[in-house]
Amino acid sequence: MRTPHQITALINSGVLEVTVDLSRSRLEEQNPLPAENEAATERNERSREAGVLRIRRLYKEARTLQVKLLSQLKQGEPIDIAPLAQVAEEMVDTMFTHGDAMLCLARIRAKDAYLMEHSMNVAILLANFGRYLGLERSTLQELTLGGLLHDVGKIMTPDAILNKPGKLTDEEFAIMRQHVVHSREILSETPGITPVMLEVAGNHHERLDGSGYPLGLKGEALSLHSRMSGIVDVYDALTADRVYKAGMQPTQAFRILLKGAGTHFDTELVQKFIKCLGVYPVGTLVLLSNQRLAIVMERNDEEPLKPLVKVIYHATARHYLDVKLLDLTRSTETIEAVVEPRDYGISLEKFIS
């Protein structure tokens, strides 16, 4: 931390404490030559592009399998999760090699495909969160598959309730809440489902203080995986664009999670979840000090306020720029604010994919 602005940004993102490591304090080092910087950045971009292709294939495959699985359920047929389990395994592998690219693509949402994309993104966020917590790879695969299947019970919820743009009535909400029960019943009868997957599907609406549903579990009755899934499910729901509402910025969602910490959510896990996504999560559009708009492409765990960004737009002149990657650790520019793409009429998809 070198400036008051950096400290303020950390506080606004929910970081409550930092560790000072004096052994890592150092004088300003001489930056590598510009040519070396550009070559390294180009190599990273080629690697990222290869990762994006793999991730898009996984997205397409997972969505196809989810559609098939839901169709089988509608027809009363038994479901086979083995193909989806294979996709979950590949997703975990990709999270270790191209995690930022996967999280970045998860920010691209279709408003009319919430159920599918929510399940996919919960799976991705659980894999990332579990990796950050140092969980075993086998557990990450269970969490990921659990995320893909966690809302399968919504197949039993009437579309009129599931897709209602306004507030649900008490009667409608009671019906909606039953999707968790349906999910647990369906998965309990499905070969290959593990206890971890059932915890994700059955407990993601439970809350630490017992105010959740369907069982009103509280405190120690909620496992680590249950607590993780509750945080992730709420975060993705808050940040998702819907037909009837725009999604929040991640920083806004962080504040809501922090507000519920200690009551609805495990305080320590909320703080770790925020840290694992970063002060400026990948896929976020930010305003730089030179009035350029840029997309956060890669986190920087060493210097969280200086991620790798892709510069795309001039905020003052209101026009697109020649796209370029900018490593803020090697630049005098700083991030001034998080901004809404829709305020500038910007679609991030063509710049991320």
Image (spheres, rainbow, N blue to C red):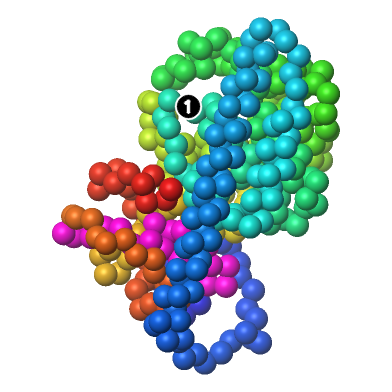
- Image x and y of residue 48, in percent: 51, 58
Which range of residues does the magenta coloring cover? 295-317
User: Is residue 14 shown above or below 200?
Assistant: below
**Camera-nearest residue between 7 and 349:** 349
- Image x and y of residue 64, in percent: 58, 27
Q: Which residue is mark 1?
A: 113
**Camera-nearest residue between 35 and 7:** 35
Decide if residue 108 is on the left or right side of residue 23: left
- The type of residue carrying mark 1 is Ala
The residue that appears at 59% across and 56% down in the rendered structure is 98
Q: Is residue 251 magenta?
A: no
Q: Say if residue 121 shows up in the picture.
A: no
The residue that appears at 39% across and 44% down in the rendered structure is 349
Q: Is residue 302 magenta?
A: yes
Q: Few, some or many C-alpha atoms within 10 Å of disc 1 (few <14, some 14-19, many ≥20)?
A: few
Decide if residue 20 is on the left or right side of residue 82: left
